[in-house]
Image: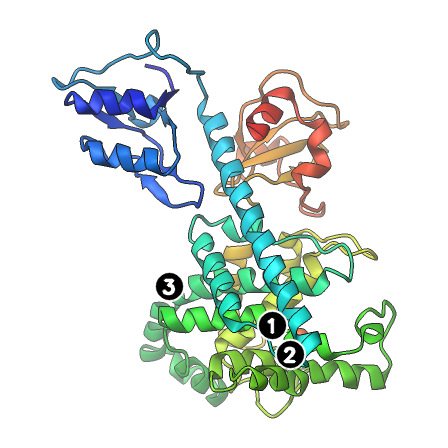
Amino acid sequence: MKNQIVTIDTLIEIVSKGGTVKTGIDIYNKSGILLIEKDIPITNLNILLKIKENGVLDIPIVPEKAGGIWDYQGNMISLEPALPKTHQLSEIELKIRKINQIKKEAGIKYKKAQDNIKKVIDDIKKTGGEFDYDSVEKTVTDLLNFLTIDESAFSYLTKEIFSYDDYLYNHSINVCTIATAVLNRFNDRFSSIISKYMVTFSLNNLDNADKLSTISYIQYQPEELNDIAIGFFLHDVGKVLIPDHILNKVGKLTDDEFQIIKTHTFEKGISIIEKNKLHYNPLIRNIVKYHHSELYSEEQRCYPNDKTHIEVPIYVKICKFADIFDAMTSKRCYKDALNPILVVTEIFRQYSEKTPLLQFLLHTFMQVVGIYPSGSIITLQNGQLAYIIDSKGPIGIPFTDRHGLTLKGKPDPMNLESQEVIQKGLGIDRRKPIRSLKDAYNLLPLFLREAITE
Ligand SMILES: [Fe+2]
Ligand SMILES: [Fe+2]
């Protein structure tokens, strides 16, 4: 049996007669919720009926991944001649479809989040500070759920910033999704490492400042993570009350202008959260107030200075890194976007040696943002362009020659970090920015375009 798409009605008919179905790949609904796990044989009709209810009408079956359809006696059924409408999809096409499905969903979530932050900003301008907190909470919860889909999910939610008009909207969403993705990973993996690190040898090696800061790290509970994510979303809310001519200034700020910008945290930001009774929430308040405070002793141009870096909580430090990262990787009217991998390496270089805690933190940061997201386009060292089909590896399909001309046929995917590929000079050119699909659409070969626009 070859890989194929089978209608849900056909599968319902087979299972109702005692048959079994196994897809071989995970199936999600439009909201990114897992409906079928790839390795679970389905014998229960209700599961398929639920899936139909979810609007999923065609199910891919991938025998290459141990998927298949069996009758009540356990004999594999080949459906090819009997199926009313099937077209065979390769594993690559199925993957591209899945990437597109997630991207589309991300687009919808992003638009909703953008509308929400626009409304928050408008309300603050109209009322002098009040906004609808419940709608912010709903929007952020929606973003958080989306982030659990896969490791590239946050990257689908970050958008380039082209103009100052949408700066605050997109920056709020970008910082929220990047910082949340990092904090989730940190919370899951590093808290246990830190506990071990604390109790075993390193307390003796840390200076007092780091001891305190390390010990003060507690694993955050889901409700706290939710509040922290809301804080990330609102971190720059105080900028709404800063005059546009200062915010939009392209050149260097004067000292006086810098003093005014600073107030978006401890003064304007705090006044807005007080008006909305959010100052009782220390997680949100700390982020709004301290996201430009020092990450290590005597870091320059930090504000406010009433907390030392030891007292600045880890989630606030993560917010500051996400803020720096987003500013550097965003495309703006006056500058190109830098390659995120380069940026994160540069941030790591600048900060990781300052304190052991920052080193821990930046390791996580690199794991989360230092990937080439599925569905993005990168340049190889010989000038060829490649479509990333899996951020793990990463695995890419080269689709142009070294002169930028579209390749004919269907090139095989390859692991772009494998020794063999690097020796051939086909590794990734890290100096070049990651390109969006839109940018390179005209260069895509037909088979990729078809899979992408399915
Ligand atoms: Fe800020
Ligand atoms: Fe910011």
Q: Which residue is mark 2?
A: 292
The answer to whether residue 189 is left or right of residue 269 is left
Q: Which residue is mark 1?
A: 320
Tag 2 or tag 1, which sits nearer the N-term? 2
Residue type beneath disc 1: Lys
Residue behind label 2 places its C-beta within 8 angstroms of ligand 1: yes
Q: Nearer the viewer, residue 148 or 419?
A: 148
Tag 3 or tag 2, which sits nearer the N-term? 3
* Relative height, residue 279 to residue 360 (above, below): below
Tell me whether circle 2 and circle 3 mark residues in contact (CB < 8 Å): no
Tag 1 or tag 3, which sits nearer the N-term? 3
Say the numbered circle drawn on residue 188: 3
Gap between marks 1 and 2 measured at Cα: 6 Å
The x and y percentages for residue 42 are 22, 32
Please give the name of the residue rendered at 66% of the width and 75% of the height, measured from the top-left corner: 124
The x and y percentages for residue 334 are 83, 57
Tell me whether circle 1 and circle 2 mark residues in contact (CB < 8 Å): yes
